[in-house]
Each structure stands twice: as C-alpha cells, then as structure tokens.
Image (tube, rainbow, N blue to C red):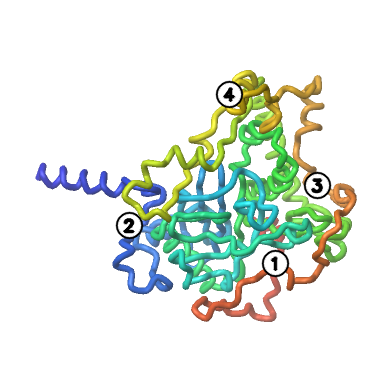
Amino acid sequence: MRLKHIALALLVATALTGCNDTLDSATGVDISKVKNKVEQPLSAKVVADMQAKNMPRNSPIMIRIYKEEGKLEIWKAKADNRFDMIRSYDICAWSGKLGPKLKEGDRQAPEGFYNLTPAHLNPNSKYYLAINTGFPNRYDAANGRNGTNLMIHGACSSSGCYSMTDEQILEIYAFARDAFRGGQTAVQLQAFPFRMTAENMARHRDSEHNDFWKMIKVGYDNFEVTKRPPEVAVCGKKYVFNQEAKSPLSAAGACPDMSTPPALVAALSTHNKAYDVAFEKAVDKLGNKVWYEPSEAERKAVVAEKRKGRDLAYAPTGTSLAAGKLMSQSEFQAMMEKRTGQPKPASTQVASLSAAPQPATVAERMKQDRLPAATGSIAATSSAPAATIQTAEGRTTSVPVPEQNPLAYTAPAAPVSEAKKPFWKFWDKQ
C-alpha cells in the first residue's frame, strides 16, 4: 500500500512539471491521443466543475486576459445569468510590453474589448488551433490602429499574439465551440495589461498608456460589480460601456447624450468609493518607488530553463511580475547610466510616481487621478479634436474579418420575437 502512495505522489509531481502545467492550467489531456481536435469534448473534470457551479454545459462564456501576470481566464454563465470563473491558464508566450497594439509589426498583443464569433475559430491553424482576437475592432479602426492575424493559439510562440500550449488551446477552443452551439453569437474577449486594482493602477499611474487604461477600466469595473459582460460601444473614438444613448453612436463622431442605468450607477458608486480610498493608500505606500517594466528578452531569461529539450520554436516569455521590480529613482537612474555609459534621466522609461507636484488634499488627488464618471451624459468627454484617419465610419471592409470556416459551428438565429435584452434590463431585475 505504501508503494502505491509513493507511486501516486510521483505521478502527481510529474504532472505538475513543465511550462504552464500548474494546478490552474493543466488540462489532463494527452494531445497525442486526440483524434479530432475540433470536436474534442471538455474533460469529465471540467464538466463536474461546471455542474458544481450550476453552469449549463452550453451556456455563454467570456475570456479575460491579464498580460502582466500572464493569465487567461474563462468565465462562464451560471443559471442565474451571472458569470463565474471556470478555468485559469498561464499564458505561455506574449510579445512586446504592456500597452495596446498600435500598428502592424510592433509586436504588441492587443488590449481592449473584442467580440469573437464562430467565424473567428480556426481549426486548421499551423499553431494547432487558433481563435482570432478580432483586432482591429471599431475602436482600433477609429484611432488609426492596424494589424492582422492577432490570435490566441497553441505552440507557445508569439509575435503579437497570446500563445498557449496545445493542451490549453484545445480546452479553450472547446469552451468557445460549446458556447456557440448553445446559441451564443459573440464571445467577449477582455484583454487588460493587468488586473485593474487600485494597487496596480497606482504602480502604473505614470505610464504613457494611463489614459487608455483608465478608459478600459470602466468596462473592467462594470463587469466586477455585475458579473455580466458589459455592453460595449464606441463613440468619439472612445469605448463606452452600458450606456443608453438617445441617438445612434458613431465610432469616429462625437458621442450623443447618454446615461447609465440607475441601478448600475448605485453599484458603481459604491465600488468607486472603495477604489478611491485604496488608490490613495497605494500611492502613499509607493512613495518615491517606480516600477521597472522588463523587456521581452528579460522576461524570456527568467523562464529560459523551460526551453531546454524543446523545439526551437517553443518560446515561453515569462511574466512581467517575475522579471520586473520596484526600485527607487536613484537605483533606476544608476541602472540606466550603467547600461548606457552616460547619465540618463529616469523619465526615459518610467516616470516617477512622486516627481510631479502632488495635490495637497485627498480630494484634489482623486480629482486628478480617478476614473471618468460613470453617471449621466458623457458627451462632454468626447469633444477632443479628431485626428485624421483613413477609415470612415461604417467601412467594415477596412477591418479584416476571418472568413467563415466550414468546420466552425454556426449558431442558430434567435427567434424573431425574442429581441435582445440590454444588459441593464437583466441586472435591474435581480
């Protein structure tokens, strides 16, 4: 009996070794024995976990990505229409640094909100299986951002994509396939630089991408307080979430008068008050510390051992949290001077969290740093001068959309009598 226990322990230890084979990401599937990857069912363990959470097998899903810590999460609707996380995976490889994708060839992985349809599934990918992220979306196009073939795929090799192991993408693909078969027409992908907590927002508050991150944090918060994917729209070249507009929205045109449902206003108000307090504490705790964000090469160095014995194309990148660090401004400047051989101000890569004069009171600091208001009309926030863009509103031909794959499931059309219910109508009732 003792030998059996030892053998079992060794078996478990073996299963937990290797890139991404952690408790939260291991799928337990032997890829070499999969006969039909497109139709591979979810494991009995996943099905049991869904049953325990009261999730119908074919209920809708949502995907959340956090670059900095290298996580991809699958959230799934329960019987009460609220979502709960069912799986979390370690992203094997993502390229570039924190921040949105701006142009073809910048090696950046997308950040923002994207709708994935059955047409975005690619069972014939050279990277085992793939799901197109939908980049560029209407927001990206309105802001002149471009790029093609940005995927979530297998093979653990990335150039602007989110790359998983083959075992992971097999399971992620199955989640999406089953949701589409259940009638979901679009899976929402939320791609964030990091979990948008007060501590993380304070640590990155002087990033050049801070305004963009504040904008998408509104959508992040909407999901946090409701556990339902927000209704996402674009106007004034900005994302807007769960808004009731009095006239049609134009991605590049000014936002019309719009309002937030009262029940959601109340929930967000409570959430934002707690956030403001936590943010102020986080800023004070950081003091003069700055965050050094590592390069892709530095991230790869942290996980170099995982490449041994693998194909050359296998390229895990590690996480920014493992390779980056907090340091004083003097330490940062000394490091940069050592690298370049000459004095270099710390602001060349990351600005000081305390270099700029700080407002005297908590209220003043909150006014400077807090998120855009979630209540009332937002038309006033969209009056900035519009940049010249090549894509006119409504021209979908400029946005690459994958062709419908014959092996991808086409979800049945909803009955004509069953109009789409806005998010807040569901939320007000429960």
From this view, report whether residue 217 is shown above or below residue 130. Answer: above
Q: Earlier in the sequence, mark 2 or mark 3?
A: 2
Asked if marks 2 and 3 touch (Cβ < 8 Å), the reply is no
Q: Earlier in the sequence, mark 1 or mark 3?
A: 3
Tell me the amino acid under the disc marked 3.
Answer: Thr
Q: Earlier in the sequence, mark 1 or mark 2?
A: 2
Q: Earlier in the sequence, mark 2 or mark 4?
A: 2
- Left or right of 316? Residue 131 is right
Residue that appears at 46% across and 53% down? 87
Whole-number angstrom distance, CA of label 2 to CA of label 3 = 46 Å
Whole-number angstrom distance, CA of label 4 to CA of label 3 = 49 Å
Quadrant of res 174 = bottom left
Quadrant of res 251 = bottom right
Residue matched to label 1: 421
Residue 27: percent from the left, percent from the top? 37, 56
Whole-number angstrom distance, CA of label 1 to CA of label 3 = 21 Å
Whole-number angstrom distance, CA of label 2 to CA of label 4 = 47 Å
- Left or right of 11? Residue 406 is right
Residue matched to label 3: 375
- Left or right of 1? Residue 275 is right
**Disc marking residue 338:** 4
Residue 81: percent from the left, percent from the top? 58, 60
User: Could you say whether the residue bearing mark 2 is in a helix, strand or loop?
Assistant: loop
How dense is the environment of label 3, judged by Cα within 10 Å: few (below 14), some, or many (20 and up)? some
